[in-house]
Amino acid sequence: MTFVVFDIGGTKTRIGFSSDGKKLDTVKSFKTDSKPEQGLAEVVAVIKENAKDVTAIAGGVRGVLREDRLGIDHDGILTKWANISIVDFLAGEFKVPVFLENDTALAGLGEAIYGAGKGVGLVVYHTVSTGVGGVRIENGVIDMASVGFEPGHQVLDIDRTILGEDVPPTLENLVSGRAVEGRMGVKPYDIDQEDVIWDELAGYLAQGLRNTVLYWSPEAIILGGSMMVGDPKIPIDSVRRATVAVLDGVMPCPFITTAELGDEAGVHGALAFLQQKMKDVK
């Protein structure tokens, strides 16, 4: 009996294996192919190499999920994966139940149950990486949503004084790695940690977190992704100070911390998600 979980990201795909459905025994990773046929074929090959008796499969994929939750509707990076049924493909190969969720939602679930939010009832997770995403986790369960959560697309630069007229004035376009590279002309990891831009980014992110606090009222906010846990990174202490300042006493600032599970948050979350879905099946 083997439970299989996966995390299909824009750069890497990770596949985890668990013999008891409670903890991961091993995780394999490889580069995500931009073509879904090749990408899914490699997923199948890795599963077959590492598991003889697959019981169930669950995982996450970046992008906006289709309404039927079988694949993604669209994504800015995995463009060719749109409208491909990941669930049907894997279910056809292994003849077992397959469940799909957004990758950020599962990373947040992983952090809430196994990582920095362990023991906290109401957690919000934001990833600040190539893009910006987020999810609300209540008592170890991903919060209900008619479509999903896209906090990275909230409008902050209303008067366009920072981004100009040609760039949508969103949180993602202020603080994501891709946005910083576009403005600075270099990769974020090539910018010295002492550069003032890192504190500027903390201030922009705090404005988005203010909305998170006002709308979702979490006990804790966990920040993950390469812009928060990489080297260099947006300083967490600067984010905390700036968030307290912009809240300005309207609401108390919750505990803000960085993610603990690193690149494996998504597969940990997928394992927790699979446990929950299998209870529904039973």
Image (spheres, rainbow, N blue to C red):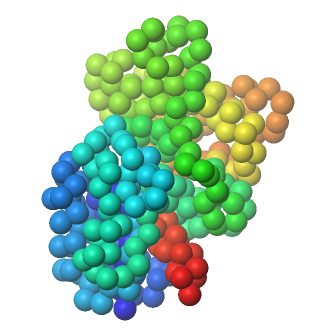
Specify the quadrant that holds the C terminus: bottom right
Q: Going 42% across and 37% down the picture, which residue do you hit?
A: 131
Specify the quadrant that holds the N terminus: bottom left
Quadrant of the rendered image containing residue 15:
bottom left
User: Left or right of 172: which side holds 42?
Assistant: left
Front one among 142 and 254: 142
Q: Going 48% across and 53% down the picture, which residue do you hit?
A: 67
Q: Going 72% across and 45% down the picture, which residue do you hit?
A: 216
User: Left or right of 91: which side holds 48?
Assistant: left
Where residue 170 appears, as percent x and y from the top left, is: 52, 25
Where residue 81 appears, as percent x and y from the top left, is: 28, 50
User: Quick check: can you spot residue 31?
Assistant: no
Quick check: 136 above or below 239? below
Front one among 24 and 256: 24
Quick check: 44 above or below 158? below
Where residue 212 appears, as percent x and y from the top left, is: 67, 39
Q: Going 62% across and 52% down the picture, which residue do you hit?
A: 145
Q: How many discs mark residues in the rendered view?
A: 0
User: Left or right of 53: which side holds 171?
Assistant: right
User: Quick check: can you spot residue 80?
Assistant: yes
User: Left or right of 40: which side holds 107?
Assistant: right
Where residue 8 appears, as percent x and y from the top left, is: 33, 57
